[in-house]
Image (cartoon, grey):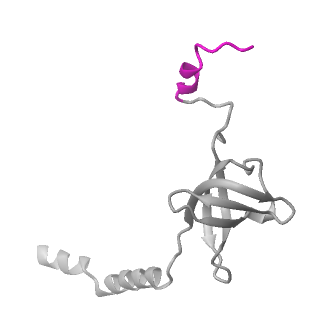
Amino acid sequence: MILYRLHRMARPGRCIGFLLLLVLLFAFGVEAASTIEGTVVSVQPKSGRFTLLQSGTMRVVEVLAPSGKLSGVVAKGAYLRIWGDFLQSDPSLFRALKMVGNGSAPKGRDPTGVRFRLNRGKRAP
């Protein structure tokens, strides 16, 4: 009885289907977005680009903003973390998909209460 159940569980069709699914998933390589971070050196608002001094490598990278529009976090001297990828046609140009700057967390929410405790001693002018 036990051998019969084991034989029924290991159906060759299921194994082949599962292996085929794995092969298809890994056959088409999924590229993960790269992450770069650094300080904004210059901003070209008309072209939707800015130059970033990449931290760690100190490499200068030209970044194309998402949909060609610069957000409020992009300013000269701002520190940014950017997700995206380098263009294959121009490896020196980084196409941004998402940008986050210092202090770009939502101002109204404090779910942990840390900001409240840190600012407890400060008085509003």
How many labels, in total?
0
Q: Is residue 113 magenta?
A: yes
* Quadrant of the rendering where the N terminus is positioned: bottom left
Quarter of the figure with residue 121: top right
Residue 50 makes an appearance in the image? yes
Would you place residue 55 above or below residue 93 in this image? Answer: above
Residue name at image x 52 percent, y 76 percent: 30
Quarter of the figure with residue 104: top right
Residue 109 pos. (x, y %): 64, 31
Would you place residue 32 above or below residue 74 in this image? Answer: below
Residue 1 makes an appearance in the image? no
Residue 57 pos. (x, y %): 51, 62
* Quadrant of the rendering where the C terminus is positioned: top right
Residue name at image x 80 percent, y 63 percent: 48
Q: Nearer the viewer, residue 108 or 71?
A: 71
Horizontal arrangement in the rendering, residue 26 relative to residue 53 (left or right): left
Residue name at image x 84 percent, y 66 percent: 47
Stretch of the chain drawn in magenta: 112-125
Residue name at image x 69 percent, y 65 percent: 63
Would you place residue 16 above or below residue 9 in this image? Answer: below
Q: Nearer the viewer, residue 45 or 12?
A: 45
Identify the main secondary structure in magenta.
loop
